[in-house]
Structures are given as structure tokens and as C-alpha cells.
Image (spheres, rainbow, N blue to C red):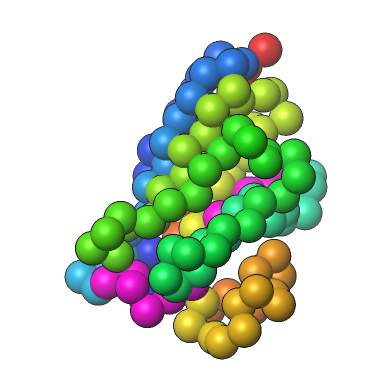
Amino acid sequence: VQLQASGGGLVQAGGSLRLSCAASGRTLRKYHMGWFRQAPGKEREFVAAISRSGGSTWYVDSVEGRFTISRDIAGNTLYLQMNALKPEDTAAYYCAASSRDSFSNYYSDFSRYDSWGQGTQVTVSS
């Protein structure tokens, strides 16, 4: 599935952004979904994930309570609501999809995802 991420931008510390991720001509309903980020010179980092049903979500500790991952009822769009942004949140953000079972065992492992979006840049100024 081809993914398209959008919604990045430049924001001051403490501000908010909402990222979106959609599939070209296809529904995301049958996929578990995740958001990852990568800052220059750093490794790709897990940010958040949501199960196929939307009933389970997971977050990296550094964004817990500030970010919310969700998917719309129709199952066509994935979101990442980011509040209270910090300069250390600056990175390119990528959405990813997985069709594999036992998602709760590997949601933070980027190698277990099958499809990736192109990334959207988030820059938080201090």
C-alpha cells in the first residue's frame, strides 16, 4: 500500500500540529499502523502505533501524554495529534503500515512494517 503523510511544518515550542497519513486509493482498515521519526544524524525512532481495530495504542515514553494516535472510523486516514511540542520533537515523521499478526509483539520494530510514507518534516523552534 502506498502511503502519503502530510501536516508537518514549523511551530514554536508548546504549539501543536496534526499529522495525517492516507493510502492512495485504498483503505487502511486491514493494517496496523505506526508513526516513526528520524532526526538528522540519529536513528529512526518509534513514536506511536495503533492496532488494526483502533482498540490498542502504544507510545514511546517521551511523547506519552502529549501525542495521540488515531484512525478515522472509515479507516482511511491515520492521524498523529501532537501537543506541547518540544524542540527535541524536531524530525522527519513517517507513517508505516503492517499487515502481520501479533502486532503487540513488534509494534516498535520498524523492520516489521511493510509500507512506508515519504515523511513529513516537523520543526519545533525554541
Image quarter in which the C terminus is found: top right
Image quarter in which the N terminus is found: bottom left
The answer to whether residue 40 shows anywhere in this view is no
Instruction: Find the magenta span and give its range.
Output: 27-39
Q: Give the image quarter of residue 12.
A: top right
| Closest to the observer, 74 or 2 | 74
Instruction: Please tell me whether residue 33 belongs to the stretch shown in magenta.
Output: yes
Outermost residue toward the right? 42
| Closest to the observer, 96 or 69 | 69
What is the tally of numbered marks visible in this picture?
0
Could you tell me residue 111's position as x and y percent? 68, 75
* Vertical side of 122 occupied by 21: above or below: below
Could you tell me residue 21's position as x and y percent? 38, 54
The answer to whether residue 105 shows anywhere in this view is yes
* Vertical side of 31 occupied by 42: above or below: above
* Vertical side of 116 occupied by 68: above or below: above
Could you tell me residue 80's position as x and y percent? 47, 45
Q: Residue at x 20, y 70 (%)?
A: 25
Q: Residue at x 60, y 54 (%)?
A: 48
Q: Residue at x 42, y 36 (%)?
A: 18
